[in-house]
């Protein structure tokens, strides 16, 4: 998974260099810090793949890996949006995602005679104040220090293939994790193209580690931006005798409206 992620990121960077041809009278693609309020909202579609492990009181099950090309058959509903507000060098960043996932091919670790199906409701919100560290013609960079909030409801139905006996295990998790990160865009010369990037990481008492990152290629317009990025979210949470280890990865297409 990590190797595929790195390869895709390198491919996107290479493509961005090929696309970055000079354009006359091109608009500035970097946000301009000013004392007036400025806002942006970015709905996006994330063709995510997911793999993870759920453990209930020592009983472990490993969910089947969902490839990005198969995601529509596993996602019942999903909604994703970013939003920002800035005044001067200070701002607020929000990234919210909700996904309803299900899989009827869950493999129970160490139990060949047991089948299972798993459903997950995942809500993830990253909320962080930001401060502009760099605002030049080539680079716009914000530092952020905030929190990622998780709400996850998981349920697994276990079925014994030989006796038809069934057992249902479920867990509900609510965790708040501090995160620190960087967000920005690198302008590709005098063209309308740029490289958007984001990375954060954090941890806390109930979360051993969480990180979110994306990198891609974007094009500026008078009204906003269109971006295609490779995005990865990983988290491991250990509350209330349950362990959730989840990795989500895929390409995301985003449209940013600025006002």
Image (cartoon, grey):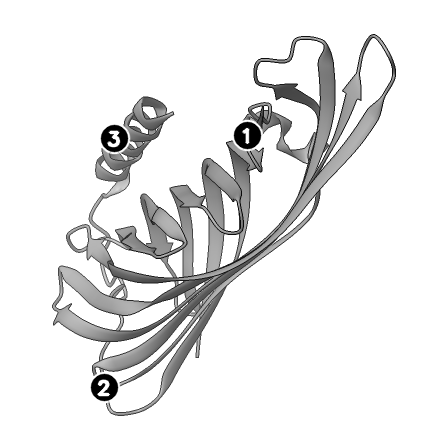
Q: Which residue is mark 2?
A: 88
Marks 1, 2: nearer the viewer: 1
Residue drawn at point x = 23 percent, y = 43 percent: 20
Dot 1 crowding, Cα within 10 Å, few <14, some 14–19, many 20+? some
In the displayed structure, 24 sits above or below 158; it is below
Q: Alpha carbon of mark 1 to alpha carbon of mark 3: how far?
A: 19 Å
Q: Give the x, y percent position of residue 67.
A: 55, 25
View extreme (right): residue: 164
In the displayed structure, 230 sits above or below 259; it is above
Task: For the residues labelled 1 and 2, say whether their Cβ atoms are less than 8 Å apart.
Answer: no
Q: Alpha carbon of mark 1 to alpha carbon of mark 2: how far?
A: 39 Å
Residue drawn at point x = 66 percent, y = 8 percent: 112
In the displayed structure, 68 sits above or below 93; it is above
Dot 2 falls on a residue whose secondary structure is loop
Q: Which residue is mark 3?
A: 10
Q: Give the x, y percent position of residue 146.
A: 32, 69
Q: Give the x, y percent position of residue 158.
A: 75, 26
Quadrant containing the C terminus is bottom left
Q: Which residue is mark 1?
A: 68
Q: Is residue 147 visible?
A: yes
Dot 3 falls on a residue whose secondary structure is helix
Q: Is residue 62 left or right of residue 169?
A: left
């Amino acid at each position: 998974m990590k190797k595929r992620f790195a390869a895709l990121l390198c491919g996107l960077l290479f493509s961005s260099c090929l696309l970055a041809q000079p354009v006359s009278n091109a608009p500035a693609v970097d946000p301009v810090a000013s004392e007036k309020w400025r806002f942006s909202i970015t709905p996006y579609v994330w063709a995510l793949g997911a793999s993870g492990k759920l453990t209930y009181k020592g009983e472990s099950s490993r969910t089947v890996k969902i490839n990005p090309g198969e995601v529509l058959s596993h996602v019942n509903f999903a909604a994703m949006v970013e939003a920002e507000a800035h005044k001067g060098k200070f701002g607020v960043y929000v990234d919210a995602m909700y996904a309803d996932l299900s899989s009827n091919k869950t493999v129970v670790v160490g139990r060949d005679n047991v089948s299972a199906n798993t459903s997950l409701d995942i809500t993830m919100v990253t909320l962080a104040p930001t401060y502009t560290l760099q605002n030049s013609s080539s680079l716009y960079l914000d530092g952020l220090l905030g929190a990622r909030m998780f709400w996850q409801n998981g349920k697994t139905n276990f079925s014994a293939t030989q006796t038809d006996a069934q057992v249902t295990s479920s867990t509900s998790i609510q965790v708040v994790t501090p995160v620190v990160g960087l967000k920005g865009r690198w302008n590709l010369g005098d063209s309308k193209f740029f490289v958007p990037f984001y990375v954060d990481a954090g941890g806390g008492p109930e979360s051993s580690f969480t990180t979110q990152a994306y990198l891609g290629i974007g094009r500026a317009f008078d009204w906003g931006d269109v971006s295609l990025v490779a995005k990865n979210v990983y988290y491991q949470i250990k509350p209330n005798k349950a362990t959730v280890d989840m990795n989500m990865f895929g390409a995301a297409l985003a449209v940013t409206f600025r006002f």
